[in-house]
Amino acid sequence: MVMASPIRTLVSSESAAQSARVCARCGSSISRRRRSARQNEELCAACDQRERRAAYFRSYYEEHKDRILDKNRRWARDNKTRIVQLRQARRVRDVDVTAVHRACVDCQAPVTRALRCRKCYIRYRYANDAAYRERRLATTRRWLEKRAGSGQQAGRRAAARTSRTAQALTN
């Protein structure tokens, strides 16, 4: 009778355990050539790398959040027409591709993922969220004061509407 050496049995049982392990996220088998203290033992190499990259970018964003948001706002301000074009193109593309045509629950405009279109969502939130309404009223009030101070009126109709709006806001 030939007995297997204890070293050979230990190595074969470790390799069997290695091949039996599966990734907690994607379900693929875990096989690693190198070990590192940074690696998550429950994830395959691809999921582990994805996790580490996501953590890096989260921390980078938190450190540089103000600068990133300022840059994004500046780009959006400089490219208003481009944003409208991209939004319209995305809406057409997404509505055409999907078999299920979704519509806004209020105005029946085509929407991609949302329950309401942008205009109806703002109207709905304004009507139902007191804190949002207060912020919007303050913003509108500042805008009207700035506009009245610069003498920027488009005509009698706009002037009457603006003065009525300002009066309604102060009441």
Image (cartoon, rainbow, N blue to C red):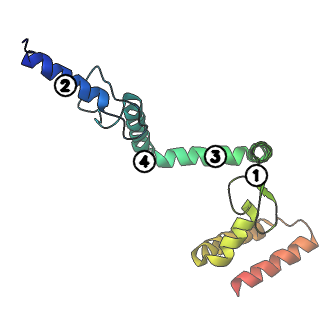
Q: Badges 4 and 2: C-beta atoms under 8 Å apart?
A: no
Identify which residue, 42 or 109, lies in the foreground: 42
- Gap between marks 4 and 2 measured at Cα: 45 Å
Q: Earlier in the sequence, mark 3 or mark 2?
A: 2
The residue that label 1 is drawn on is: 100
- Check the picture and name the quadrant holding the N terminus: top left
Q: Which residue is mark 3?
A: 74
**Three-letter amino acid code at the position of disc 4:** Glu
- Percent across and percent down for residue 111 are 75, 55
Q: Amino acid at mark 2?
A: Ser
Mark before the other along the chain sequence, 1 or 3 = 3
Q: Which mark is residue 70?
A: none
First in residue order: circle 4 vs circle 1? 4
Q: Amino acid at mark 3?
A: Arg
Q: Where does residue 92 sit, x and y in percent of width and height?
A: 80, 45
Q: Is residue 163 left or right of residue 124?
A: right
Check disc 2 and report its element: helix, strand or loop: helix
Q: CA distance from mark 1 to mark 3?
A: 36 Å
Q: Position of residue 149 (x, y in %)?
A: 75, 69
Crowd class of label 1 (few under 14; some 14 to 19; many from 20; radius 10 Å): few
Please indicate whether residue 86 sits to the left or right of residue 131 in the image: right
Q: CA distance from mark 4 to mark 1?
A: 38 Å
| Image quadrant where residue 31 sits | top left
Separation of residues labelled 1 and 2 (CA atoms): 52 Å
Name the residue beneath numbered marker 4.
62
Q: Looking at numbered disc 1 in the image, what kind of residue is underneath it?
A: Val
Residue 150 visible here: yes
